[in-house]
């Protein structure tokens, strides 16, 4: 429907297999389990998925058991190639590229030069593979590659916006103007792009949150609240970045210990530099608070290890300063782990405060500590949250919903 958001459950049966190009930046990174699950869901529906990426992730972020296999089947487009860049430039000059470069500014011009060769390679590969459509799971340079390939005679393309538009670089009007459709993970972000990109949006904009495989992310045994006199086991999972708020969880932990609450905190994730970046500041903060016996940084761990940690946890906490939505929250809730998040970004569209989880203010370790303490002493509340969170994710955030939406939209384009 033109200019309207759509959010409906699609059917899983298809009449004709599709050949789908699928672009993810730096695939497979530590937070890319959602993409892997969606690819598997598409293939389970009978479609062929050909994965492309801009470049390989740093070695320290290659954490999953499936990462090596995924890398072997991924085509990386980011190699420097002056010849293909020249071919792409010649193809795009008649399409008005110079005008867009002038309108969008220096940053867009730089991104253009960096992506021209990749776009030409994608165009050629799409033709060789007979791709029906290309989906870019990013609105950064991956989207620019898909747009350029399309304008050079390649297949139609679509986008997914996973966070605030400001996180994805210049040239947004160009990327969106030529897309056939787009999915946006929250209503909040959709409202923002209506304001920012009015006049340059595709006709089809669909709210489709990320999701989790609720069959895999299911408890092996029923959730049990902490026994009296035993430590509260808290798990957190997210990149080691200041905006993830791990330092606030550490500060809350210090407060709780000083108040006599015994807890053990494990934090899974690594910084974007593979362990030589923000991790060092967190380690210093941990030492300053004298928490070495209570808080452990696990580094980047694979999806199976995350699932095991969730199985063992009494409580999941992610104190993000900003979170577009939060797959980590979804995984915890799907595993029936009572969850505390922050009322930041689009998290309120995922966690219903007091019903399916609890929300606290970002950057407020005191409020976080009080909420953890309250739940630690209320086993009935923990059991209620465990059941309610699981039911909410099963109903609204299954990974297969994203695959079904993508297929339905491509079929609509092709008239199937």
Image (spheres, rainbow, N blue to C red):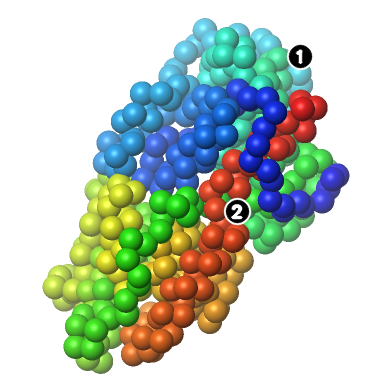
> Residue 243 location in percent, x, y?
43, 62
Between 229 and 290, the one nearer to me in the picture: 229
> Is 163 left or right of 414, judged from the image as shown?
left
Quadrant of the rendering where the C terminus is positioned: top right
Quadrant of the rendering where the N terminus is positioned: top right
Between 192 and 341, the one nearer to me in the picture: 341
Q: How many marks?
A: 2
Q: Is residue 76 above or below residue 255?
A: above
> Residue 97 location in percent, x, y?
71, 22
Instruction: For label 2, count other residues whose C-alpha is less than 10 Å away and answer few (under 14), some (14-19) or many (20+).
Output: many
Query: Residue 96, can we see it?
Result: yes
> Is 152 left or right of 297, judged from the image as shown?
right
Q: Residue at x 77, y 33 (%)?
A: 412
Q: Residue at x 77, y 52 (%)?
A: 5
Q: Which residue is mark 2?
A: 209
Identify the secondary structure beneath mark 1. Answer: helix
Q: Which residue is mark 1?
A: 94
């Amino acid at each position: 429907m033109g200019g309207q958001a759509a959010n409906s459950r699609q059917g899983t049966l298809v009449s004709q297999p599709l050949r789908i190009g699928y672009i993810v930046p730096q695939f497979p990174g530590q937070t890319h389990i959602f993409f892997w699950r969606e690819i598997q869901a598409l293939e389970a529906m009978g479609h062929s998925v050909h994965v492309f990426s801009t470049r390989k992730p740093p070695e320290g972020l290659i954490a999953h058991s499936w990462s090596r296999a995924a890398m072997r089947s991924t085509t990386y487009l980011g190699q420097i190639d002056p010849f293909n860049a020249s071919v792409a430039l010649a193809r795009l000059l008649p399409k008005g590229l110079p005008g867009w470069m002038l309108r969008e500014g220096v940053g867009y011009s730089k991104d253009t030069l960096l992506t021209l060769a990749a776009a030409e390679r994608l165009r050629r590969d799409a033709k060789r593979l007979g791709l029906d459509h290309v989906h870019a799971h990013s609105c950064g340079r991956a989207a620019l590659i898909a747009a350029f390939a399309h304008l050079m005679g390649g297949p139609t393309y679509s986008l997914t916006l996973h966070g605030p538009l400001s996180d994805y670089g210049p040239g947004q009007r160009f990327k969106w103007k030529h897309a056939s459709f787009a999915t946006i993970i929250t209503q909040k972000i959709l409202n923002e792009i209506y304001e920012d990109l009015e006049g340059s949006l595709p006709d089809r904009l669909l709210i489709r949150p990320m999701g989790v495989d609720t069959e895999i992310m299911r408890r092996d045994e029923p959730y049990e609240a902490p026994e009296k006199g035993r430590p509260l086991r808290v798990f957190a999972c997210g990149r080691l970045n200041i905006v993830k708020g791990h330092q606030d969880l550490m500060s809350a932990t210090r407060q709780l210990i000083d108040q006599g609450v015994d807890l053990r905190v494990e934090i899974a994730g690594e910084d974007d530099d593979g362990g030589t970046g923000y991790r060092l500041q967190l380690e210093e903060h941990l030492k300053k608070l004298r928490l070495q016996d209570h808080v452990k940084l696990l580094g980047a761990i694979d999806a199976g290890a995350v699932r095991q940690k969730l199985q063992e946890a009494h409580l999941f906490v992610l104190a993000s300063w900003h979170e577009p939505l939060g797959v980590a929250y979804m995984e915890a809730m799907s595993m029936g782990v009572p969850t505390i998040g922050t009322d930041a970004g689009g998290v309120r569209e995922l966690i219903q405060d007091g019903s399916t989880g609890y929300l606290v203010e970002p950057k407020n370790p005191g409020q976080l500590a009080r909420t953890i303490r309250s739940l630690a002493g209320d086993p009935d509340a923990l059991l209620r949250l465990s059941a309610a969170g699981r039911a909410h994710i099963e109903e609204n955030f299954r990974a297969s919903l994203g695959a079904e939406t993508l297929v339905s939209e491509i079929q609509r384009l092709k008239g199937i």
